[in-house]
Image (spheres, rainbow, N blue to C red):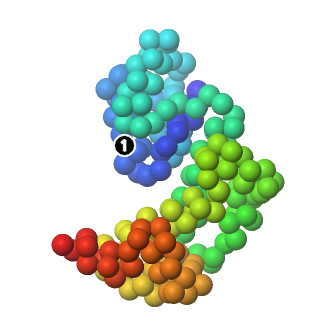
Amino acid sequence: MQLPIKNMVCPRCIMAVEQILIRLEIPFHAVQMGFVELKNELSEKQTQEFEKELAAIGFEVLQDRKQRILEDIKLALQELVNKENEQALKTSAFLAERLNLDYNYISSLFSELQGEPLEQYLIKLKIEKVKEYLQYDLALSEIADKLHYSSIAHLSSQFKKMTGLTPSAYKKEIRN
């Protein structure tokens, strides 16, 4: 039995969900980004306990098809941002191929359910990645290259627009 889980975006999320399953003694095959593969159907009591534990750490079981697609979009975008050394992929082509859906549908569904344009969400993900790289003292040119920005100026401009700080000011702030 496969359960789609909302808001799983990193390996720590996987570990947190695994710990809940172990603590509740729910047998499972695997926990992966965005879903849990259970060995058996859950009883009503197990379902309630599992959903309560997930909610406590910011996750939820997805029931709605559109919500599942939204989570698939978010996971795909996260993957796209984390593809460091691969050739730059056009977001629309990547998502359409990955989800096997028309990009216009993907984009409008995302905006409808998320309340913001897909492109804006992607920029936020990239800026979070820039913050992470700045903590590791990577040069802006290297960060721009890893995240497929057209220039350092474009990266800096987006960073300042989203955070209110230049990358160098942000770097100074995290050091203090």
- Residue under the image location 52 percent in, 36 percent down: 5
Q: Which x, y percent locates residue 20?
A: 36, 30
Q: Closer to the camera, 106 or 111?
A: 111
- Compared across the picture, whether 121 is left or right of 131 comes to right
Tell me where residue 172 sits by quadrant: bottom left
Above or below residue 151? Residue 136 is above
- Residue under the image location 49 percent in, 43 percent down: 7
Q: Which residue is mark 1?
A: 15
- Compared across the picture, whether 96 is left or right of 45 comes to right
Which residue sits furthest left?
176
- Compared across the picture, whether 65 is left or right of 86 comes to right
Above or below residue 47? Residue 78 is below
Q: Which x, y percent locates residue 99?
A: 72, 51
Which residue sits furthest top?
44
Tell me where residue 165 sits by quadrant: bottom left
Above or below residue 129? Residue 138 is below
Amino acid residing under circle 1: Met
Above or below residue 139? Residue 162 is above
Label 1 environment density (alpha carbons within 10 Å; few <14, some 14–19, many ≥20) = few
